[in-house]
Amino acid sequence: MLEVSQKFKDNIYAPIRKITARIYFTLYGNTKMYDSKIISLNLLEEMNTINNTLPSNELKVTLDNTAGDFNILNLSKQQEIIASRPKIVVEFGLDFEDGSAIEWVPMGTYFLIEWKNETAAMSISLIGRDNLDMLSQVSYTPIAGSITLYNLAVDVLTKAGITNYSIDDSLKLITTTGFSDRLDSRTALQHIGVASKSAVYQDRNGVIIIKPFKVLDQSSNYLSHAGSQRSALGGFYAGASSYPAVLTDFDMKIIDYDNIFQEPEVSLEKSPYEVIVNVYEPGGTREVVYINSSINGKNGASFKIDNPLINTESLAAEVAAWIIAESNWNAVYKTVWRQNPILECADVILVEDSFDAKKQTRIFKQEFEFIGYLRGNTESRGGI
């Protein structure tokens, strides 16, 4: 969750609020800010904690072009515009409407992949994605010899021209023989994420993060309404139900019926009944099968991992256990609501259901839709 002032927290869920938006568009080294020209703005953020996919965040912003400022044919070097990777920085602001300054929060850094003048050129649409999208187009040449996953990740990012990253120190404890064949940088990071049991994603400040997350605690998945008597620490006084994983900023980390447009949609996905891991050993590759004993049956999915960085059976067992533990929390909650721009993917939140119970979940996908006001979808995964 992003750091903001207490005043922001006190007003973001107010019955009447005013959210505004602005973008900073950098083309050929020249940066301009646009706010009143924004007709609509849509942001899609997504991450996957077990890295069976490595999604890229996406922005689409439609701007008023009645003055002709954005006519493509009026720009020089049209053939170089997309190739130069123009940068778009997005911010949402909470206008307190009391004469004080708007408080702005970052909503991500994106790079232009499509520029389209709409019918009659009265508006234009800019579509951008984050650095993970670019990495799929950058080839990575492996280095020979033993290397830690930390140093391997640094090498992949550095060769791709990425300098803004944060890698957890736990990756320094895992040594591998690296990759034997050339591959794209995005796939290389995906393999590193799986082998280190880490999520790989880009944060709101444009930093690529490689970091493990703790599996949600089963004991705190069945949560009921605790009443209105909050403690100063963000929980509740003795005698009421507690919220073990959401102890701070409780009011920010809850999606309740006061802020939703319709009852949350809940779906139950299959848990894997087995995880098959290819172990890359010096003598060749062999399969090891791990059974998910917690689901008591085979009416589930078979999950296979083919990762050249997994070169010992002990590492294979750790990765399989991690995949099983994460996948067992297979209830997916989709909520259409007013949205809170300081919540990020990977935040653990509480979602209120129709029975007045609060379910602990981790955000993995968010959509922010700005059309003069803010609304959107939040998808989170947890226990039922």
Image (cartoon, grey):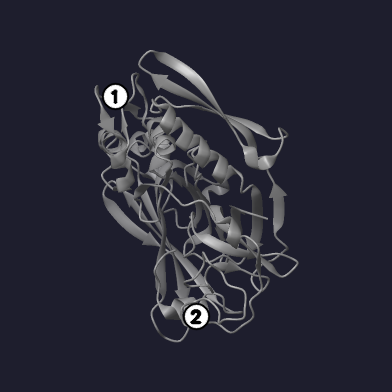
Q: What secondary structure is found at the residue carrying circle 1?
A: loop
Task: Indicate the secondary structure of the residue bearing disc 2.
Answer: helix
Q: Position of residue 123 (x, y in %)?
A: 52, 53
* Residue 343 versus residue 240 in the image, above or below: above
Residue matched to label 2: 10
Q: Which mark is residue 142?
A: 1
Q: Amino acid at mark 1?
A: Pro
Q: Nearer the viewer, residue 105 or 344?
A: 344
Instruction: Report how many numbered discs are placed on residues in the image.
Output: 2
Q: Which residue is most to the right? A: 355
Tell me the crowding category of disc 2: few under 14, some 14 to 19, or many 20 or more residues within 10 angstroms, Cα based: few
- Residue at x-position 40% and y-position 53%: 203
Sequence order check: which comes first, mark 2 or mark 1? 2
**Looking at the image, which residue sits at the far top?**
283
Q: Is residue 13 visible?
A: yes
Q: Is residue 94 left or right of residue 367?
A: left
